[in-house]
Amino acid sequence: MQLRYNFRLYPTAGQRRALARAFGCARVVYNDGLRARREAHERGLPYIPNAELSRRVITEAKKTPQRAWPCEVPAVVLQQALADLNSAHRAFFASITGERAGARIAEPRYKSRKDSRQSIRFTRNARFAITAGGRLRLPKIGDVPVRWSRSLPSEPSSVTVVKDAAGRYFASFVVEVDAEPLPKTAGEVGLDLGLTHFAVLSNGRKVTNPRWLRRAERRLKKAQRALSRKVKGSANWTRVRLRVARAHSQVADARRDFAHKLSTRIIGDNQAVYVENLCVSGLGRTRLAKSVHDAGWSQFVGMPAYKAARYGRTFAKVDRWFPSSKTCSSCGTLAESMPLHVREWACPCGAVHDRDVNAAKNILAAGRADRLNACGGTVRPVA
């Protein structure tokens, strides 16, 4: 399986200028290709194939005075920009024809030089390399210092250089990793995600919601007020804008680190993990939107999925319409109504349930039932 390994880059002033030039050239080639296809569509002409588009916006455009400056950057960077455009068009066409499952994908849009995130990609054809001194050698850019937090498991097939909104540079390597099955364990767990507690496990354990954004809200508000007082586009505005972006990046980094550590611990301790398939996009349109996005459920759920495949574990999602909170995990009785303020309830069979723990137990039972699928055995946990 393929994984991404991200590392922090610390380019020099000259290397930052070279990277900015490469970002700009890749963006212009992407926009030129998108513009050519849109104009052809408006004129009723056939769709421009990938090879013909590359010849127009790269090969022939370099011969004109207006587009001579892309020669200063590696050709692979420009080709990969067009490859991204082709992938975006294929996904768009597959979405409108129904060949692609999921939400509808919008048509590709033009990229702006004011976008908060800029990136370029180098493949093996670009002959990027890691030097003996631990630096990343990029063609026409130089040897960029890298902060190696861990070693790469294999030779990378490509590297993407990213500049985020906070002005930080990262190198994202795509590497091929082998499966590393962990010793088998008898533990199985169901997860109920929430806002009071980030996750409640079927074994009764509760993980407190860190609320990273809420904790940093005072500092963010102060920085945002300072930004609102500056003249947009001025030097002071740029300086304070970076301060706001760095504050947000610290929140995002803390949330990602928490999700990685928690998902790794859960996958390591249990042979099977089941979680409810929440509609986060729908919850993000309610009055709880800020808290929902602060929790980062989608980011967290995606981590056990690939870690389970790598470490030989089982991970599955349970249907969100399953009444996990209102169903008694002991006898299966379904309660008629249960408002959100009810956190503990008693079943006529005599069992007293914590709402979240009961939901986690039912998620575990539903996951077991889907997994066994009439293969025999008890699927509901013992009370």
Image (spheres, helix red, strand yellow):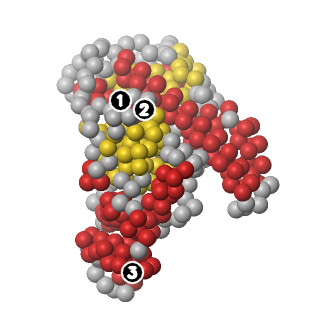
Residue at 70% x, 50% y: name it. Answer: 239
Q: How far across and down, in percent of the image, does residue 188 sit? A: 35, 19
Crowd rating for badge 2 (residues with CA inside 10 Å; few <14, some 14–19, many 20+): few
Amino acid type at circle 2 is: Trp
- In-image side of 360 versus 312 (left or right): right
In space, the residues marked 3 and 2 are separated at their CA atoms by 42 Å
**Residue corresponding to mark 3:** 64
User: How many other residues sit within 10 Å of disc 1, few (<14), some (14-19) or many (≥20)?
Assistant: few
In the rendered structure, are the residues bearing label 3 and label 2 in contact, judged by CB atoms less than 8 Å apart? no
Which quadrant of the rendered structure holds the N terminus? top left
* Tag 1 and tag 3, C-beta contact below 8 Å: no
- x and y percentages locating residue 243 in the rendered image: 68, 45
The one of 117 and 48 positioned closer to us in this rendering: 117
> Relative to residue 164, is residue 218 depicted above or below?
above
Q: Earlier in the sequence, mark 1 or mark 3?
A: 3
Q: Are marks 2 and 1 in contact (CB under 8 Å)?
A: yes
Q: What element carries label 1?
A: loop
Question: Which image quadrant is residue 54 in?
Answer: bottom left
Q: Name the residue under label 1.
A: 151
**Distance of label 2 from label 1 (alpha carbons):** 7 Å
Tag shown at residue 148: 2
Under mark 1, the amino acid is Ser
**Residue neighbourhood size for the residue with mark 3, other residues' Cα within 10 Å, grouped as few (<14), some (14–19), many (≥20):** few
Name the disc covering residue 286, or none. Answer: none
Residue 335 visible (yes or no): no
Q: Which residue lies furthest to the right in this view?
A: 229
Q: Which of 381 and 285 is in front in this view?
A: 285
